[in-house]
């Protein structure tokens, strides 16, 4: 085997121009593949974060609760935030929370009481959505406390947190009081302890957070809650987790974000498909380039191959020489292409920025994707060398020496 390696390296070295041309093709192909994969992967991750990063991935509610959807148009695809109009709430919610608390796939659990009503100040009357929460638990999903623009993250008693747009509409500041009225006509005055910005105008205009006990009293919920909101580690496993929770708690209705965001999933699948198609044709082009140049190399090196065969080198060893060339070209080109692709990704992050100076979206290089790109390029190099290897093995040593 050492003999084949030495001859393969010598052939590559003596045909420097051909070798450089092949390497350039592989480097460009792999760089495009890595850059495109990182770009689309970062775009998809950013889209997912903006859409469901700070919202529940799975929601559990009473079987006969009536869901009502708010359409939030923060991007072209939009996203759906679902809350319930109570027919009856979850009465055994504490048992459910205790049973799923240790589940490693579930990263956040937030029991929530939801209802609709109005915020009133002077002559202004704004429709709102009451959100009774445990602030520490809800922070793990909505990141409310870090998103306060005024006041402090304080719930309990008659303290409430409301959105920036709602506060501006009612001319409220932290420390002011506001009158809140439920859909059933129950009303009371509350102190605005803080004002938040969830990064979504519709939510900022309508959501009002208060403590679970206070919302239960205000909305006449008793010991029930409206929903259990969950976030999970793998967002694309939400359907499987929802089915598992439904099996464990058949008296509940379980909904995943994948069920309520089909448009988003379709867009993500389309992006992935287009990326795979482009990468496939890039690899095909690289493979054909390697194969054609190595085929020319067989013709050019036919005299040397004939001499090797006349000296006793069998057909398999001659064919192996060209397979090793394909492997070396693919592996070296893959490494250089990966480094070039990562460099292009970082250049894109540094050059393309928002008006505020932040990256347009983060680009993360996936080590698994890099490994797959390396293996594909190396395999493509060896595959491209098969035909030249077979052709070289079939050469008649006497003919090529006489005609060479």
Image: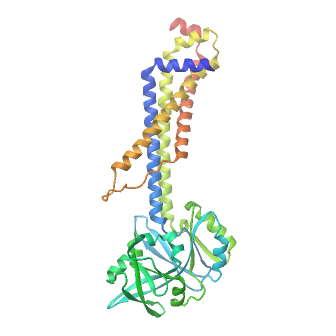
Quick check: 129 left or right of 314? left
Residue 182 x %, y %: 46, 89
Colour setting: rainbow
Quick check: 337 left or right of 97? left
Q: Residue at (47%, 39%) from the top-left corner? A: 338
Q: Nearer the viewer, residue 236 or 170?
A: 170
Residue 131 x %, y %: 49, 80
Q: Is residue 306 above or below residue 104?
A: above
Is residue 393 among the parts visible in the rendering? Answer: no
Quick check: 110 left or right of 360? right
Query: In the orientation shown, which residue stands out farthest toward the left?
Result: 355
Q: In terms of image quadrants, where is residue 107?
A: bottom right
Q: Residue at (50%, 71%) from the top-left corner? A: 139
Q: Nearer the viewer, residue 33 or 136?
A: 136
Q: Is residue 232 above or below residue 345?
A: below
The quarter of the rendered structure image containing the N terminus is top right
Q: Nearer the viewer, residue 215 or 285?
A: 215
Query: In the orientation shown, which residue stands out farthest toward the top?
Result: 402
Residue 159 x %, y %: 45, 84
Residue 294 x %, y %: 50, 24
Quick check: 339 left or right of 217? left
Is residue 138 among the parts visible in the rendering? Answer: yes
Total tally of numbered discs in the picture: 0
């Amino acid at each position: 085997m050492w003999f084949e390696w030495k001859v393969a390296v010598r052939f590559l070295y003596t045909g420097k121009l051909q070798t450089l041309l092949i390497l350039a093709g592989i480097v460009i192909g792999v760089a495009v593949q890595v850059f495109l994969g990182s770009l689309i992967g970062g775009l998809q991750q950013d889209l997912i974060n903006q859409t469901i990063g700070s919202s529940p991935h799975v929601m559990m509610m009473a079987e006969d609760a009536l869901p009502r959807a708010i359409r939030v148009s923060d991007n072209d695809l939009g996203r759906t935030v679902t809350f319930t109009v109570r027919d009856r709430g979850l009465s055994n919610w504490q048992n459910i929370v205790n049973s799923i608390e240790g589940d490693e796939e579930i990263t956040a659990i937030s029991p929530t009481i939801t209802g609709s009503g109005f915020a009133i100040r002077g002559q202004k009357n704004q429709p709102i959505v009451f959100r009774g929460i445990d602030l520490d638990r809800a922070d793990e999903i909505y990141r409310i406390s870090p998103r306060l623009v005024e006041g402090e993250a304080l719930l309990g008693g008659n303290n409430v947190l409301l959105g920036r747009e709602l506060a501006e509409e009612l001319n409220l500041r932290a420390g002011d009081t506001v009158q809140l009225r439920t859909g059933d006509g129950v009303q009371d005055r509350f102190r605005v302890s803080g004002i938040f910005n969830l990064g979504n105008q519709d939510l900022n205009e309508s959501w009002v957070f208060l403590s679970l006990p206070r919302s239960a009293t205000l909305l006449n919920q008793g010991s029930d809650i409206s929903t259990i909101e969950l976030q999970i580690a793998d967002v694309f496993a939400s359907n499987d987790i929802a089915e598992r929770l439904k099996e464990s708690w058949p008296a509940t209705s379980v909904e995943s974000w994948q069920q309520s965001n089909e448009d988003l999933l379709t867009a993500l699948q389309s992006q992935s498909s287009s990326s795979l198609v482009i990468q496939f044709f890039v690899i095909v082009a690289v493979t054909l380039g390697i194969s054609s140049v190595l085929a020319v190399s067989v013709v050019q090196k036919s005299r040397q191959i004939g001499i090797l065969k006349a000296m006793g080198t069998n057909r398999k060893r001659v064919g192996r020489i060209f397979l090793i060339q394909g492997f070396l070209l693919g592996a070296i080109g893959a490494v250089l292409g990966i480094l070039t692709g990562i460099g292009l990704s970082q250049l894109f992050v540094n050059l393309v920025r928002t008006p505020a100076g932040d990256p347009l979206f983060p680009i993360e290089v996936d080590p698994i994707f890099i490994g797959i790109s390396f293996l594909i390029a190396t395999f493509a190099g060896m595959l491209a060398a098969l035909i030249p290897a077979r052709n070289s093995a079939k050469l008649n040593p006497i003919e090529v020496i006489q005609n060479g």
